[in-house]
Image (cartoon, rainbow, N blue to C red):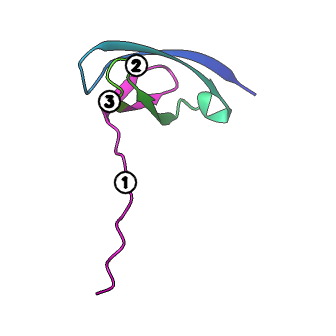
Amino acid sequence: MLSQLLCLKYTCTGCGDPLDAMLQAEGQGIAENSGAAINMPCPCCGVKNQIVFTTDGEIHSVWRAREYGRIPEPSVN
């Protein structure tokens, strides 16, 4: 199995602090330079950032990750 260590440098979408993330990518997609996405929380403000990157370490986009809350049940009137 192929394995690669990546260092992603990006800016938090919540507080604007520069962040570094170390990731270990494994699998057959590494040889094909395929894309991946990960949600990373900021250690300063707690906002979850969604990072889209390729296995060569290039970041394509960073935006605030969607958080889905509970859907309220309708009342039985």
Q: Residue at x 59, y 15 (%)?
A: 5
The relative height of residue 23 versus residue 63 in the rendered view (above or below) is above
Label located before the other in sequence (2 or 3)? 2
Q: Is residue 34 left or right of residue 77?
A: right
Is the N terminus in the top left, top right, bottom left or bottom right quadrant?
A: top right
Q: Which mark is residue 59?
A: none
Q: Please, what secondary structure does the residue beneath circle 1 have?
A: loop
Res. 31 in view: no
Q: Nearer the viewer, residue 19 or 71?
A: 71
| Disc 1: which residue | 69
Measured Cα–Cα span from mark 2 to mark 1? 22 Å
Q: Which mark is residue 62?
A: 3
Please identify the residue farthest to the front as the structure is shown. 77
Res. 13 in view: yes
Q: Which mark is residue 43?
A: 2
Q: Nearer the viewer, residue 47 or 76?
A: 76
Label located before the other in sequence (1 or 3)? 3
Let me know if residue 44 is in the magenta part.
Answer: no
Measured Cα–Cα span from mark 2 to mark 3? 16 Å
Q: Position of residue 27 (x, y in %)?
A: 68, 32
Measured Cα–Cα span from mark 1 to mark 3? 22 Å
Q: Please, what secondary structure does the residue beneath circle 2 have?
A: loop
Badge 1 amino acid? Gly
Let me know if residue 74 is in the magenta part.
Answer: yes
Q: Position of residue 35 (x, y in %)?
A: 48, 35
* Crowd around label 2: few <14 · some 14–19 · many ≥20 (10 Å): few
Q: Nearer the viewer, residue 47 or 75?
A: 75
Badge 2 amino acid? Pro
The relative height of residue 50 versus residue 75 in the rendered view (above or below) is above
**Residue interval drawn in magenta:** 49-77
Please identify the residue farthest to the right as the structure is shown. 1
* Crowd around label 3: few <14 · some 14–19 · many ≥20 (10 Å): some
